[in-house]
Amino acid sequence: MPPSASVSAVSPPGTSPCAGASPGTYAPAETPLDTLDTPESPLDTPASIPDTPESMPGVSESLPDASFIPSDVPSALPSAGTSASPGAFRAAFGAAPLPMAVVDREGLVVIANESLGALLGAGSAALVGRIAADLVDLASDARTWHAYREVLRGRQARLRCTRRLKHPDGHSLWVQVTVAPLPPQEEAVLLSIADISARRELQARLRHLQMHDPVTRLPNRTLFFERLSSALEAEAYEEGGTGRIGLCYLDLDGFKAVNDTLGHRVGDRLLAAVAERLTRCADEAGYARGATPLVARLGGDEFALLVEDSTGTDQLADLAESVLKSLQAPFDLSGQRLSVSASIGVVERRAAGTSATHLMQAADTTLYWAKADGKGRWTLFDPERNAHRMTRQALSSTLRAAIDRNEFALEYQPLVGMEDGGVRGVEALVRWNHPQFGTLTPNRFIGLAEEDGSIVQLGRWVLATACRQARRWQLDHPDAVPIFVSVNVAVRQVWDSDLVADVAEILAETGLAPHLLQLELTESAVMGSAGRPLQALQALSDMGVRIAIDDFGTGYSNLAYLSRLPVSVLKLDGSFVRGFQYEGPDGGAHPNPADEVIVEALIQLAHRLGLTVTAECVETASQATRLRGIGCDTGQGWLYSRPVAPDRISALLTANS
């Protein structure tokens, strides 16, 4: 046995007895974080291996000198029954192009071939007695070290792993190390090394192509999410840094027009030029902060700047401002000058508890806000605004089902005659009794219903319920003057359904007289109506149904067109009534003559056209007095009553009968 051979040759990681190896031996290269060595394939452990560790067998005292292959070691190399001589196998082992070594159970090199010596920059004889694990860096990680020891003990079939080694001449190479047992009687293993540097280099080039955008040369979506996911792992921020992460999500404004008018080749040049400016901004931010943001193209005209270990929203705001400023100067693309702006969504938060999906959702939402707010700007993520958006989305997704579940109800607000204070009619106002958000007023969900088309189904339910209730009041109070019911109708109900047929069917079903039904449409929906909407309004008017223009005075105000519409009622917007008074120098409320003149003129015009006028939002007795003085017909507002349940209207009718 060589003098240096001992049980300590199989030592745990970090306590290698070869730390002071002589020059000319192979030293493991420092491996960067992104190329840490791990076994390439799962370790194959036979099922027959016992669970209890066996003691490591000692090295035989009869081992011959390592300068030649002893007769008992190479006897494992030829197959039984072959005619080849041991010398032939010794010659084949020594001349084999694959670097190999026989390693005893102690982990020491018994014999090595010339290819291994050439690979490691030392003669094969100089490797004898050396610790094999140190030569190929098998003790650098616990998993590989444990597997290697199991192979030495005969408890594991083989080990295959990848290592990056540094040659004494300075260059590095990647090798695949395989350790496999020899026949049991040999009490040794065969270590072989394959140079895979060319393959690794090809893999690296292919990965670069796979992970980078061919147009801008920037990291692509795949690499961006790989970096983002890595930055959000706990070990990435728990060991140091700020523990925060920031993202600027960028979208070019009007880029599609460039592709459509100038072609995709010019569009690609513009994207590449934008990428250069974004990279310059990131580099400048890196000089100031010490860490350069990752710039990536996520697809189309969308870019992202990822800031790991961010210091707060100020840092992200500065970065967004610098990006917008850098894009202000026109781009000169082969003589073609183009100007472009961008919208940026900015998100900055603690990395703990944040996932890549949630961060990107927040960034995408904020980018949408930036575009909705006017483009060419950056917008910071607002949790309250996002909560409102999420609530809106939750309402939108459950609206149709809520109609089927009968979660809606109607309340009624009286329309009162200005002269005598008697109830002339009621306006039906829908409420959503949401199981999570409570009672919701129309302004929370009517817009959503119009967007997704469920307003047709909801509107039909409101119309039928209101007419049925109006008829019930009429039957319950035969001595009282019948009151009409006013129902709001969205313009989409006119376009997407047969409103005339629906109204006729409901009136016939409930037995309500047509003149006791009033349909309210907004001024913007009625003014300028042509074709089908105008025909529907005319048919309803011919049927005897009253048509009212709601919120009059805030829309088109096309007074000339008003005379040609089948309208019978104008409902003045509440802003006019509220403007009847203002705060004077003495701090008291005083009438606003201008608003009063406008309202008086509108009322006179309406009367000349044969229309009646209803004033909304009447809240004080003084407002009611002035409205009555200028000829307003009916009023609606909290002065008379808030919207109430049907039984409260019944009580009111009983009191007035």
Image: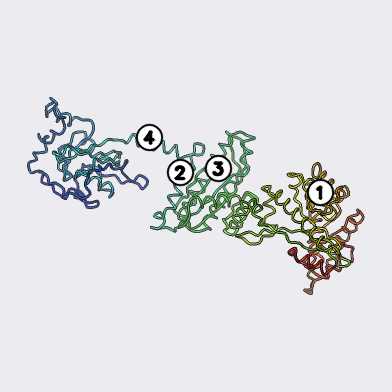
Q: CA distance from mark 3 to mark 1?
A: 46 Å
Q: CA distance from mark 2 to mark 4?
A: 18 Å
Q: CA distance from mark 2 to mark 3?
A: 19 Å
Please name the amino acid that badge 4 sits on: Leu
Q: CA distance from mark 1 to mark 4?
A: 69 Å
**Residues at badges 2 and 3 in contact (C-beta under 8 Å)?**
no
Which residue corresponds to mark 1? 527
Disc 3, SS: helix
**Residue name at image x 13 percent, y 36 percent:** 73
Disc 2, SS: helix
Q: Residue furthest right?
A: 608
User: Which callout, 1 or 4, points at the residue further toward the start of the chain?
Assistant: 4
Please name the amino acid that badge 1 sits on: Met
Disc 1, SS: loop
Which residue corresponds to mark 2? 223
User: Which callout, 4 or 3, points at the residue further toward the start of the chain?
Assistant: 4
Image spot of residue 644 (x, y percent): 74, 65
Please name the amino acid that badge 2 sits on: Leu
Which residue corresponds to mark 4? 202
